[in-house]
Each structure stands twice: as structure tokens, then as C-alpha cells.
Amino acid sequence: MKQLDNWLCKARTEQRIATGKKSYEHLPKESIDTLNKWFKEHESNPYPTITEKAELMTATGLSERQLKNWFTEARKKQSEETGVPTKTRQKLPEEDMDYLKYWFAKHSSHPYPTKEDVKTLALATGLTHQQVKGWFVRARENQKKTGCEQGKSLDSTCKNSGLLYEYVEL
């Protein structure tokens, strides 16, 4: 048995070197079926939220790394088939935007959320940490470009900035 394992390992290594590609262990068919079903249902935005990733990991028995790799390859395949690039940024849901805008306005004198703030905002909105951090980067850039002053009150609006600085009941 050990000889067979050594032979398989050597064969995979030689194949990887010859093709320049990594060799992957095959995922269970049931797991792939579950992922394909989810992917087809979310074809317009095939990026699972943190909650959806956790649910998929539980349903499939895959690790986070395996899940990430599967989705990367599936999106790449979808892009090749449709001719649409994979890196098209989707617009965030409006209710999530309102929540982030409110936080931004409330902290306008220093609109840099801490790691704990990002975690809280991600949980409250269902967005990933990366989406929350990216939104704040773009919001601060937009604020600088439009000449919006920091420290505006919550009931004022900074015109032409796309950032609404008004109180939103959460």
C-alpha cells in the first residue's frame, strides 16, 4: 500500500511538472452537486456571503480553502463560457449602503473603522469584511474628490458626493 501511495505521489508530481499545473484531489460528487446548484441559483452574483459560505461548508463538508478554490474556478469557467470578465463589481444592496453611510456620517471626523467596527458592520449587513473595507476606501476617496468637508452634521447633505449624510433609523 505504501508503495502505491509513493508511486501516486511521484506520478502527480511528474504530471504537475510536465503540465505546469497543480493536481487537485477530486471533491465528492454530492459536494459538487450542492455547489453547482448554489452557483446556478446565484449566477448573476456568484459570491457567497460569510453566512452562505458557512452553510455551504457545513452542507458539503469542504474546508474554506476548498470552497474558495472551487468558486474561483467556477467563476473562471463561467467567464470563459460567457465572455464576461469575472471581476465586475456588483452594486451593494441599498439597505446595506444606508447602514454604511450612516456609520460614515456619524464618524465623519475620522471615517476609519477599527477591525472590531468592520467585523460588526460585516455582521450587521451580511457583507464580507473585504466588501466593508472596500466600501470605506471608496467612500473616503469620493469624499476627497468632491471636496466634501469632514465633520458635517448628520442632518446635512454633501452635494455631488453620492454620500448621503442624513440620519437613517436602523
Image (tube, rainbow, N blue to C red):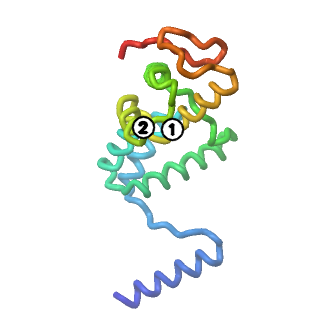
Q: What residue type is disc 1 on?
A: Lys
Q: Residue at x 44, y 34 (%)?
A: 127
Q: Residue at x 60, y 13 (%)?
A: 158
Answer with the quarter of the image where residue 66 lies. bottom left
Of the two numbered discs 1 and 2 on the same chain, state the one appearing first in sequence: 2
**Residue on which the image places disc 2:** 118
**Residue on which the image places disc 1:** 133
Q: Residue at x 65, y 77 (%)?
A: 18
Label 2 neighbourhood size at 10 Å, few (<14), some (14-19), many (20+)?
many
Q: Which image quarter holds the C terminus?
A: top left
Q: What residue type is disc 2 on?
A: Val
State the residue lying farthest toward the left: 58
Answer with the quarter of the image where residue 113 lies. top left
Q: Which image quarter holds the N terminus?
A: bottom left
Q: Image check: 19 left or right of 46?
A: right
> Residue 83 got which mark?
none
Q: Position of residue 84 (x, y in %)?
A: 67, 38
Label 1's element? helix
In the image, 24 versus 138, the foreground residue is 138
Mark 1–mark 2 distance (CA, rounded to whole Å): 7 Å
Look at the numbered discs 1 and 2 and tell me whether their residues touch, using CB distance below 8 Å: yes
Q: Position of residue 103 (x, y in %)?
A: 44, 24
Q: Position of residue 69 (x, y in %)?
A: 49, 55
Q: Residue at x 52, y 34 (%)?
A: 45
